[in-house]
Amino acid sequence: MANVISVITAVHGPAAHHLPDAYKSLLEQKLPEGWDWQWVVQEDGETDAVAPYVPGDPRISFGQGRCGRAGMARTMALSRATGQYVKVLDADDMLTPGALARDLTALQEPGICWVTSRVLDLLPDGSLVSFDHDPPAGPLERGAVLEHWKAHDFRLPVVPGTMCARRNLVLALGGWMALPASEDTGLLLALSAVSRGWFTAETGLLYRKWPGQSTSQAAHVHEGERSARMAVIEERARALAALDGWRVAV
């Protein structure tokens, strides 16, 4: 039986038409011998808008559930994830060729529990724009992402939408945070608070920019809500970092 990497995608109706592009990017992945991927697609809601865009592939598990935003959908998807590792892929984004293989290679490095990679923004006109704050390739020491985030007005040095991590550690941390937004930032900072990560300099994700994405909505930058999100994310990460006896078995 093949080893499995579980790719988790939360989706709601307005983004469902992008799923075929995400699926195409999965089909283009070449994994190391003995590995295969599983795609766990979880609708945030129970409508008829998403299922028509889900391909008929036995490696795909599609589920639905009550609306609770992306964090809850991803956490619910964990119940069907069978892989040792879980990889995030938003419904409107695409992996680049070789992304999953690079993640798996990095996760074999001693003590590495999670991986992120370089991102290119995919604009509506088809052009690509690079992220301008990438760290050096290689290990990200425990706590380094949190300190950078705090020192740079809550700007991360890496993109949480590229995260691949040990499934058991994601579960131990409670999955994605129960927040209206930034739930992936919360998980990434929790991972960084208790374990070492890795940054891959090769581009691993095309991050689609389009008017319907949740991060383009006014509510996403509402100052009162944003401040509350950042506060609870930081407090959780610092509380985890301060725990005595926390040990990650790798």
Image: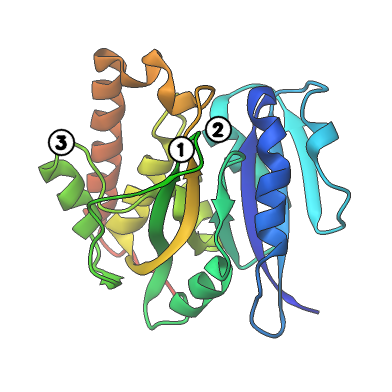
Q: Is residue 39 left or right of residue 91?
A: right
- CA distance for labels 2 and 1: 22 Å
- Count neighbours of disc 2 (C-alpha within 10 A) and say few if under 14, some if 14 to 19, many if 20 or more: many
* Of the two numbered discs 2 and 1 in the rendering, the one whose residue sits closer to the viewer: 1
List x then y, in percent, for residue 216. Answer: 42, 23
- Count neighbours of disc 3 (C-alpha within 10 A) and say few if under 14, some if 14 to 19, many if 20 or more: few
Q: Earlier in the sequence, mark 2 or mark 1?
A: 2
- Asked whether the viewer can see residue 43, the reply is no
Q: Name the residue under label 2.
A: 70
Residue contact between numbered discs 3 and 1, judged by CB atoms under 8 Å: no
Of the numbered discs in the image, which one, if any, rests on residue 153?
3
Of the numbered discs in the image, which one, if any, rests on residue 224?
none
- Count neighbours of disc 1 (C-alpha within 10 A) and say few if under 14, some if 14 to 19, many if 20 or more: some
Residue contact between numbered discs 2 and 1, judged by CB atoms under 8 Å: no
Vertical comparison of 179 with 122: above or below = above
Say what secondary structure mark 3 lies in.
Answer: loop
Q: In this view, does 21 lie to the left or right of 202?
A: right
Question: Which colouring convention does the figure follow?
Answer: rainbow
Q: Tell me the residue at 38%/83% (across/down).
A: 110
Of the numbered discs in the image, which one, if any, rests on residue 123?
1
Q: Earlier in the sequence, mark 2 or mark 3?
A: 2
List x then y, in percent, for residue 191. Answer: 37, 56
Q: Tell me the residue at 51%/42% (across/down).
A: 126
- CA distance for labels 2 and 3: 24 Å
Amino acid at circle 2: Ala
- CA distance for labels 3 and 1: 25 Å
List x then y, in percent, for residue 100. Answer: 57, 68
Q: Quadrant of the C terminus?
A: bottom left
Quadrant hosting residue 114: bottom left
Say what secondary structure mark 1 lies in.
Answer: loop
Amino acid at circle 3: Asp
